[in-house]
Image (spheres, rainbow, N blue to C red):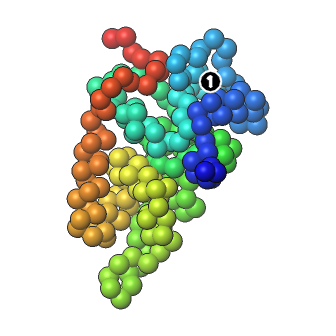
Amino acid sequence: MPERRYSHYKQEDVWATLYQLQTAFGVQVHDGTVHGNSVSLSRGGVVYHAVILARSSYWYAYSLNCTERWRHHITCVVAGTHDSCLEVPVLAIDTMHWYEPKTTRLKGDTLQPLKLDAAGRTADRFEQWRKTQYGHNILIGALMCGRPDAFERLRTLPASTQRRIHAKLKRLHLRRPGRPLAVLEDKK
């Protein structure tokens, strides 16, 4: 089966592209700082401890958001594609763009419902995105970051969808079972 645009990013490709295009991204990877899936890099005089992910939504899949239970030093994400909303800056390899914390890759960066149709449902551009895995990850990430526009969007969804999303958010706030992703951890 051929790879699709959204699924073809692999962690190894992100590593290779980061090393090859350091100057194009405006970063410098520090030699000898690779620890598992993390690396130290500099951008504009600021040193970041970055985790390398195929998609930024894997931040939640690997429970990297659970910093109160799992102390790590990750201060940014280098991802093949930015398909979520994170509390840390994200360098997206596919767009060669840095995204600030709590921002998405959508133009306008708003999840707020713009208008209602005759049945009382939202009728805007994000509504079509929301029904895809890509849009769902963006909404979940924005909810995890506590963005008010995401909660406003959630209130416009059917009750069963709201319950399902709230259950998913509850699961994502817990650390996933199994061995954690190998990153630079705090030894305290």
Q: Which residue is most to the front?
A: 1
Q: Quadrant of residue 29?
A: top right
**Residue 21 left/right relative to 50:** right
Question: In this picture, is 86 found above or below 176?
Answer: below
Q: Which residue is located at x 69 percent, y 29 percent?
A: 16
Pinpoint residue 26: horizontal percent, then vertical percent.
71, 34
Question: In this picture, is 120 found above or below 70?
Answer: below
Pinpoint residue 33: horizontal percent, then vertical percent.
59, 14
Q: Amino acid at mark 1?
A: Leu
Question: In this picture, is 119 found above or below 110?
Answer: below
Is residue 43 visible to the viewer in this orientation of the structure? no
Q: Which residue is most to the bottom?
A: 118
Q: Which residue is located at x 43 percent, y 25 percent?
A: 181
Q: Which residue is located at x 40 percent, y 33 percent?
A: 62
Is residue 60 visible to the viewer in this orientation of the structure? yes
Pinpoint residue 164: horizontal percent, then vertical percent.
26, 57
Q: Which residue is located at x 44 percent, y 63 percent?
A: 130
Q: How many marks?
A: 1
Q: Quadrant of the C terminus?
A: top left
Q: Nearer the viewer, residue 48 or 5?
A: 5
Query: How many residues crowd around disc 1 within 10 Å: few (fewer than 14), some, or many (20 or more)?
Result: many
| Label 1: element kind | strand
Pinpoint residue 178: horizontal percent, then vertical percent.
33, 26
**Residue 176 left/right relative to 6:** left
**Residue 24 left/right relative to 66:** right
Q: Name the residue carrying label 1.
A: 41
